[in-house]
Image (tube, grey):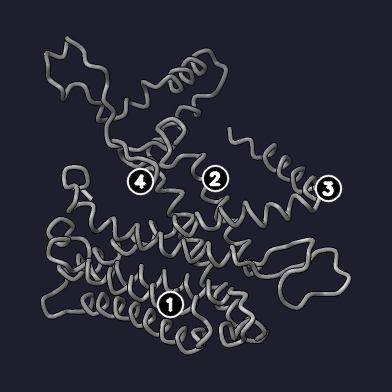
Amino acid sequence: MDWWGPKVLLWLILVAVSFFIPNGFFMFWGNYVSLIGASIFILLGLVLLVDFAHSWSETCLENWENSPTSSNFWQWVLLISTAVMYLFTFTMTGLLYAYFAGSDCTLNRFFISFNLALCVLITFLCVHPTVQEYNPRSGLAQAGMVAAYCTYLIVSAVSNHTHESQSCNPLRNGKGTQKTVVIMGGIFTFLAIAYSTTRAATQSRALVGKGKKDRVQLPEDDATGGHSELGYVTSQPSRHESPRYQALLAAVNAGAIPASALEEEDSDDDDEVLGETRDDERSGTRYNYSWFHVIFAIAAMYVAMLLTDWNIVSKRPITGPVEPNSDVYIGRSEVAMWMRVVSSWMCMLLYIWSLLAPALMPDRFGDL
């Protein structure tokens, strides 16, 4: 039973109770918990991004191999998409140097230059012969996506820099420019979140641990004669042998329910896909309930930080123009900037590790 009625009622009660929670709780939650959760979601997004990049490149290569010899459509799709990613990376890097790297913006120039160096490094590593030998799936398509994603994080970080100089952050007082960036970034972000949350939640087995889902191994029995193949269940039992069907049959024989109930049960069985069952609670779901909700929780934190432009709320005045006689003050935070910069560096390190791990430890990561 799904219990949707009590669930909806409980949700409405929680919504009503939220109006009575003191503002201090939300200030703490927004300034610390959501900030950390949003940064975790950024790191998780890299795993999904690399997964999408691998799937995209493999799909293009597979379609290219299966297409007629005279057709190079999928080859051009892969090449153009990779070129677009690198074009975005170097274009945004050039704009950062032009507008956010003034003579007195040492920290910004370090962020931009270090990110550019990392982008060049992963481009070199992904096509290195040793890496290709142990990890033939690596290529410029994946590196381009990672470079574009990390460059976007650096753009977001330096645009949140609270430097007093206008040359270090021209978007600081540009209201019209900020609105355009927020609208365009919001559209892209919600599309990305829709994919990321769904993909991460439904692929939780790959994120928290893999298991053998195709067959179930039973405890060994001496009666099997040592044949391990007999220790596996490779098919579902007949529907007519299930306890549910036997209970319905007994009820029909007793005259408690009409015989049409058995026909409805058989018709439901015909609608099922071979080898699968409709009742995911009985056969096992494809995702973990707890992990599913954790993914959506940190995604909600990420959305909240985006909608508030990573601002913080404080009872004390924050650097920059403030409203007089305000109960609380809203402003930008150096912590938010550093969280995104560090997240970008972590993304690069994770991708570099995914390239080097099969070569450094082939026995453990040889199947990546």
Please name the residue that numbered disc 2 is placed on: 293
Q: Three-letter amino acid code at disc 2?
A: His
Instruction: In this rendered view, identify the residue nearer to me: 226 or 347.
Output: 347
Between marks 1 and 3 in the image, the one whose residue lies nearer the viewer: 1
Mark found first going from the N terminus, 4 or 2: 4
Please name the residue that numbered disc 3 is placed on: 20
Q: Dot 2: within a 10 Å radius of its alpha carbon, few (fewer than 14), some, or many (20 or more) residues?
A: few
Mark found first going from the N terminus, 2 or 3: 3
Q: Three-letter amino acid code at disc 4?
A: Ala
Quadrant of the rendering where the N terminus is positioned: top right
Which of the labelled discs sits on residue 206, or is there none? 4
Q: Dot 1: within a 10 Å radius of its alpha carbon, few (fewer than 14), some, or many (20 or more) residues?
A: many
> Which residue occupies 41% across, 86% down?
94
- The residues tagged by marks 4 and 2 sit, at their Cα atoms, a distance apart of 16 Å
Q: Three-letter amino acid code at disc 3?
A: Phe
Q: Are marks 1 and 3 in contact (CB under 8 Å)?
A: no
- The residues tagged by marks 3 and 4 sit, at their Cα atoms, a distance apart of 40 Å
**Would residue 6 appear left or right of 348 to someone viewing this image?**
right
Which of the labelled discs sits on residue 112, or is there none? 1
> Which residue occupies 44% across, 52% down?
200
- Residue 235: x %, y % from top left: 27, 30
